[in-house]
Image (spheres, rainbow, N blue to C red):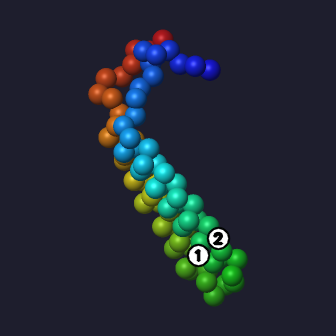
Amino acid sequence: MTQDPSVRRDVPAYVALVRIAAVIGMSTAIAFGIFLLLAGTRYFLWGAICIVAALPFFLLMRFAEGTAAPDEHPPAS
């Protein structure tokens, strides 16, 4: 399952840091949202807001990965 070295692309260090921060942020928001949803109907709205709050972390991760994309596309095989 190794890739050809000519196809492999190096990713900058900031992308790895953004991925780590985004995964921690998403998991925290979703876990807290599920916890509030399980707490009862009184906290349903707050739980839903916490789960939706995970979306910016995902978008941040996708943005960071997009900025690190190479300008040229590898040749199709």
Q: Tell me, yes or no, whether the two marked residues, 1 and 2, touch with CB atoms within 8 Å.
A: yes
Rendered location of residue 25, percent (x, y): 50, 61
The answer to which image quadrant residue 37 occupies is bottom right
Mark 1 Cα shell of 10 Å, populated few (<14), some (14-19), many (≥20): many
Distance from Cα at disc 1 to Cα at disc 2: 6 Å
Q: What residue does disc 2 label?
A: 34
From the viewer's perspective, tell me whether residue 75 is left or right of residue 3. Answer: left
Q: What residue does disc 1 label?
A: 47
Residue at 33% in and 29% down: 70
41 or 17, which is in the foreground? 17
Mark 2 Cα shell of 10 Å, populated few (<14), some (14-19), many (≥20): some
The circle drawn on residue 3 is: none
Label 2 SS:
helix
Rendered location of residue 7, percent (x, y): 44, 18
The residue lying furthest to the bottom in this view is: 42
Q: Can residue 62 be seen?
A: no
Rendered location of residue 76, percent (x, y): 44, 15
From the viewer's perspective, tell me whether residue 31 is left or right of residue 62. Answer: right
Rendered location of residue 13, percent (x, y): 38, 41
Residue at 39% in and 19% down: 74
Tell me if residue 45 comes above or below residue 70 in the rendering: below
Residue at 39% in and 53% down: 60
The residue lying furthest to the front in this view is: 13
The residue lying furthest to the top in this view is: 77
11 or 55, which is in the foreground? 11
State the quadrant of the N terminus: top right
Q: Amino acid at mark 2?
A: Ile
Label 1 SS:
helix
Tell me if residue 65 comes above or below residue 6 in the rendering: below
Q: Amino acid at mark 1?
A: Gly
